[in-house]
Image (spheres, coloured by chain):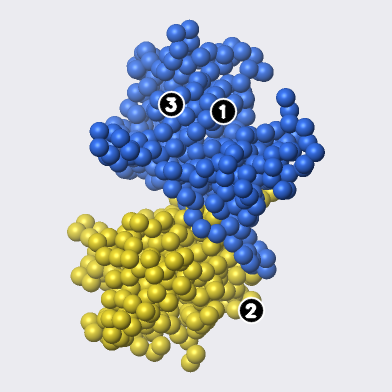
Chain colours: A blue, B yellow
């Protein structure tokens, strides 16, 4: 009866979402007749897969391209290059599914809970909007709204008729999560979804996200600058720096045994929660460079304590090191870096 | 006697046409030279309003004050405009969350620092510029001579925040007020700025009040931490006591609900509900509606901030 319930098509081994070679550059500034125009290389040659039922965490500092990745995955931005496959179906290609079908399966929650709700619609109208647009009769849509509100812990009798300005930040973010769930998506992209909330409220929303995932069999892509929250929620973690993946692997490996110098720096830059073990020295100096004209070769080399000649000449590829993948010359035998193993055989 | 700053029973309320918001409701604390007090609280807890009151930065005609703020013995709330200008420029300095908006965009960093020095110390133009360059070196801005000529938009967020610290220290203040100065910065930059503030604080024997919502940041910089809720300090203790043995149910909840290492898979102990509306003055403890230890006497009268153990103050009937 309900046409909006998604079906698992490829089976458990088929990644829910597969993106390969995604690239997004934004031109900036003028230049005469478009010549000499500068380009922000927000995302470059990014390949990732999201397995069914997992939470993939994405971390990085501002300007690293993590929000661009989110917008590419749900096609709010059209990639310059690259392909996406949703559970076996290519997206936006002749034999595949349309962008609208993608968005029925993939939904997103943004950081600013107020800006992402229409101030002139009641919460009930907002939540019913997408199901109605996708053909659900009004009576069923109303039922769906009640169901959604109770799922996110808001009493439907009390909240359906209210307007966004009548809610607190935490309540509004619950509404945004409910709206993302309105079409029964399979993948929810959470772009800094708890970052604007106070800590005591953040914990409530995190608990709710864990419950909803289990109850509805959801898959999450969780994007945040907060390393602790990403560690708490994620099964796998992707670390980005200036539009590139620098490290990708299971959460235990990334946090327990980080391999890339940037990941290590990022993790040790976390304030210590112990006044007896305060940070003595900043792990790296300086700010992240401007993503316009990123450094040649390895983009981290300008801040890396181990940078050598080879790092400026050759761009490191994301190579498997056993537990995780790392884009660093030190990890590649025979790369020419003095810390890399010399007698390695480069895989054919 | 040796107190740099004494705040006593500070109340701040803002009047708007349709309501009055009671932002700060009886805050008292002392600060010594060379000491860092961290004020920890969530949005709307009154932490920034408390901080700004020390410089009287609120709009005069809409703000109602009571209580006392004594800076090196001088009552700030009674100061005349001239004394206030001297307090703001020379004796107490403040750094803000967003350095991009704290600087004037149409003047270079050097012009803004040099002007401040000339205005408050009467130095010559050449001396002021020389001092400005020294200050940029002090906050470790690379190639300071060139950076003096840079406009704020030409600098990265971390550099701007360093420049703002240089500006704040330009007239040798004895008290530095920091309002979430690292919140807008990236993680790898935040730690650099925190370490810089800690270092400068020691070097110049500054009193620092550091307002933040981030427990990790507060622990990293503070000697003592005051936790604020609904316009009151609910707990005030040394940083180790606060982290090891918080006593107020709100401080305990805040620490328990903050995600950190090793909490994966555990359910978070969230505090239910949301902070109260500050338009109404509560009859009892403001935290009572969210508190899991609430008793009948919590709602009859507001609890006082009372000693509970050695130099540990708690505003709760359970520890009184």
Give the farthest residue toward the right. Answer: A343
Q: Position of residue A107 (x, y in %)?
A: 46, 27
Q: Residues within 10 Å of mark 1 (few under 14, many from 20)?
A: some
Residue B36 shown left or right of residue A250 in the figure: left
Tell me if residue A348 comes above or below residue B258 in the rendering. Answer: above
Camera-near label (1 vs 2) is: 1
| Of residues B210 and A163, the one drawn nearer to the viewer in this rendering | B210
Q: Element at badge 2? A: loop
Task: Tell me if I can see residue B214 in this picture.
Answer: no
Left or right of A86 in this view: B262: right
Measuring from the top left, give residue B186's x and y in whole percent: 49, 53
Query: Which residue was labeled with disc 1?
Result: A47
Residue in the picture at 41% in, 33% down = A25
Where residue B77 sits: x, y (%)? 30, 81
Q: Which mark is residue B310?
A: 2
Mark 3, secondary structure of its residue: loop
Quadrant assignment, res A77: top left
Q: Are marks 1 and 2 in contact (CB under 8 Å)?
A: no
Residue A244 vertical position relative to residue B319 in the rendered view, above or below: above
- Residue position marked by numbered label 3 in the rendering: A79
| Quadrant in which residue B28 is drawn | bottom left
Q: What residue sits 64% from the left and 14% below the top?
A: A11
Report the residue at 42% width, 69% height from top.
Answer: B144
Q: Is residue A347 visible?
A: yes
Crowding at label 2, few (<14), some or many (≥20) Cα neighbours within 10 Å? Answer: few
Q: Chain of mark 2?
A: B
Residue at 54%, 74% in the rendered image:
B199
Q: CA distance from mark 1 to mark 2?
A: 57 Å
The quadrant the C terminus of chain A occupies is top right
Compared with A172, A89 (above or below) is above
Q: CA distance from mark 3 to mark 1?
A: 12 Å
Same chain for the residues under marks 3 and 1 in the image: yes
């Amino acid at each position: 009866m309900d046409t909006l319930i998604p079906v698992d098509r490829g089976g458990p081994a088929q990644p829910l979402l597969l993106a390969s070679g995604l690239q997004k550059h934004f031109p900036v500034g003028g230049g005469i007749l478009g010549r000499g125009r500068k380009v922000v290389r927000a995302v470059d040659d990014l390949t990732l897969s999201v397995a069914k039922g997992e939470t993939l965490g994405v971390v990085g500092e501002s300007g690293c391209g993590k929000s661009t990745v989110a917008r590419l995955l749900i096609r709010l931005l059209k990639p310059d290059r690259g392909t996406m496959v949703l559970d076996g179906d290519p997206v936006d290609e002749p034999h595949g599914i349309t962008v609208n079908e993608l968005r029925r399966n993939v939904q997103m929650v943004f950081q600013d809970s107020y800006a992402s709700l229409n101030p002139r619609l009641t919460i009930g109208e907002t939540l019913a909007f997408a199901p109605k647009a996708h053909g659900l009769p009004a009576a069923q849509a109303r039922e769906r709204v009640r169901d959604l509100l109770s799922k996110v812990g808001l009493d439907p009798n009390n909240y359906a008729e209210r307007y966004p300005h009548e809610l607190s930040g935490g309540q509004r973010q619950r509404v945004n999560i409910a709206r993302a769930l309105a079409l029964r998506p399979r993948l929810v992209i959470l772009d800094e979804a708890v970052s604007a909330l106070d800590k005591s409220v953040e914990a409530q929303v995190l608990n709710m996200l864990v419950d909803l995932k289990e109850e509805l069999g959801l898959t999450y892509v969780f994007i945040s600058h907060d390393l602790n929250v990403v560690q708490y929620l994620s099964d796998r973690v992707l670390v980005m720096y200036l539009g590139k993946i620098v490290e990708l692997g299971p959460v235990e490996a990334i946090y327990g045994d980080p391999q890339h110098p940037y990941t290590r720096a990022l993790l040790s830059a976390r304030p210590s929660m112990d006044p007896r073990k305060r940070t003595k020295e900043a792990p790296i100096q300086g700010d992240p460079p401007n993503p316009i004209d990123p450094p040649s070769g390895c983009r981290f080399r300008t801040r890396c304590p181990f940078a050598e000649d080879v790092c400026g000449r050759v761009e490191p590829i994301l190579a498997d090191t056993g537990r995780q993948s790392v884009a660093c010359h030190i990890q590649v035998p025979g790369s020419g870096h003095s810390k890399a193993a010399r007698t390695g055989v480069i895989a054919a | 006697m040796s107190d740099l700053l004494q705040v006593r029973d500070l109340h701040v309320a803002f009047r708007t046409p349709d309501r009055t918001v009671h932002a700060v409701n009886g805050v008292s604390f002392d600060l010594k030279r060379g000491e860092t007090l961290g004020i920890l609280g969530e949005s709307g807890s009154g932490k920034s309003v408390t901080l700004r009151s020390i410089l009287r930065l609120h709009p005069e005609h809409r703000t109602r004050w009571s209580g006392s703020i004594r800076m090196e013995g001088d009552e700030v709330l009674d100061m005349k405009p001239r004394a206030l200008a001297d307090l703001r420029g020379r004796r107490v300095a403040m750094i803000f969350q967003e350095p991009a908006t704290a600087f004037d965009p149409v003047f270079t960093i050097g012009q803004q620092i040099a002007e401040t020095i000339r205005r408050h110390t009467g130095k010559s133009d050449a001396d002021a510029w020389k001092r400005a360059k020294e200050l940029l070196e002090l906050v470790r801005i690379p190639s300071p001579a060139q950076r003096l000529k840079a406009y704020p938009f030409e600098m990265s967020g971390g550099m701007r925040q360093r420049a703002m610290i240089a500006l704040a220290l330009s007239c040798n203040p004895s008290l530095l007020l920091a309002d979430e100065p690292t919140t807008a910065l990236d993680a790898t930059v935040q730690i650099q700025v925190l370490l810089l503030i800690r270092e400068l604080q020691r070097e110049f024997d500054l009193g620092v009040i550091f307002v933040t919502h981030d427990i990790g940041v507060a622990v990293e910089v503070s000697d003592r931490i005051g936790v604020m809720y609904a316009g009151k300090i609910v707990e005030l203790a040394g940083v180790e006591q606060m982290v090891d043995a918080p006593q107020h149910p709100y401080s305990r909840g805040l620490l328990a609900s903050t995600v950190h290492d090793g909490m994966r898979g555990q359910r978070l102990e969230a505090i239910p509900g949301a902070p109260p509306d500050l338009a109404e003055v509560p009859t009892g403890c403001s935290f009572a509606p969210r508190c899991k230890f609430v008793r009948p006497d919590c709602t009859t009268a507001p609890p006082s901030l009372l000693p509970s153990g050695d130099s540990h103050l708690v505003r709760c009937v359970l520890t009184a």
